[in-house]
């Protein structure tokens, strides 16, 4: 078994309404030489919960809530930092754009690992200027996360 971060590529698909403003259709991060530090995906709510009472009975309840968070940590020198900043600023300044981006993580064999639908950048990440370049973590709120 072998693992390498180089074997993963995250693609952010830009909605049609934003493509002209950004001049791009996707933002891709990953692969060799990509200044990538990490990807992260988490659900906001448990799918299954169990309620029990003092008589010993219980019931399992299922939630179809797939909302969650995705994050992407990049070296601050990555060209994608500029693209993500522009993306955030366009969403921030427009009341007309009502469709979020789609985020897809794929492995080296082009298998989809995670798909996140209707996502928005939560905020511009903190910026710290130091003697050597640091990282910036971009956080997205997602309407739906599907693990494949």
Image: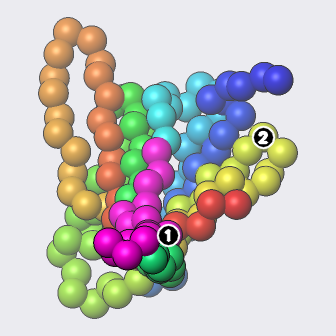
Specify whether 42 is left or right of 53: right
- At a point 21% along the width and 51% down the height, the residue shown is 124
Residue at disc 1, secondary structure = strand
Asked whether 44 falls inside the magenta stretch, the response is yes
117 and 20: which one is in front? 117
* Vertical relation: 78 (above or below) 19: above
- At a point 17% along the width and 16% down the height, the residue shown is 130
Q: Quadrant of the image for the N terminus?
A: top right
- Give coordinates of residue 95: x percent, y percent: 21, 87
Using the image, tell me which numbered label, if any, was put on residue 109: none
Specify whether 112 is left or right of 25: right
Which marked residue is nearer to the observer: mark 1 or mark 2?
1
Using the image, tell me which numbered label, if any, was put on residue 108: 2
- At a point 73% along the width and 44% down the height, the residue shown is 107
- Give coordinates of residue 143: x percent, y percent: 42, 75
Label 2 neighbour load within 10 Å: few <14, some 14-19, many 20+: few
The alpha-carbon separation of the residues under discs 1 and 2 comes to 32 Å
Q: Are marks 1 and 2 in contact (CB under 8 Å)?
A: no
Q: How many marks?
A: 2
Q: What residue is shown with label 1?
A: 48
- Give coordinates of residue 59: x percent, y percent: 47, 79
The region drawn magenta spans 40-56
């Amino acid at each position: 078994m072998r693992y390498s971060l180089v074997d993963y590529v995250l693609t952010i698909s830009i909605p049609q309404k934003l493509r002209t403003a950004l001049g791009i259709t996707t933002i891709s991060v990953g692969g060799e030489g990509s200044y990538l530090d990490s990807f992260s995906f988490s659900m906001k709510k448990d799918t299954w919960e169990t309620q029990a009472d003092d008589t010993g009975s219980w019931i399992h309840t299922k939630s179809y809530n797939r909302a969650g968070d995705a994050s992407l940590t990049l070296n601050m020198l990555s060209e994608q930092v500029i693209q993500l900043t522009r993306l955030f600023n366009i969403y921030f300044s427009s009341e007309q754009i009502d469709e979020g981006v789609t985020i897809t993580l794929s492995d080296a064999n082009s298998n989809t690992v995670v798909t996140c639908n209707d996502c928005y950048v939560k905020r511009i990440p903190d910026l710290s200027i130091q003697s050597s370049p640091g990282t910036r973590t971009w956080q997205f709120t997602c309407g739906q996360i599907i693990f494949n």
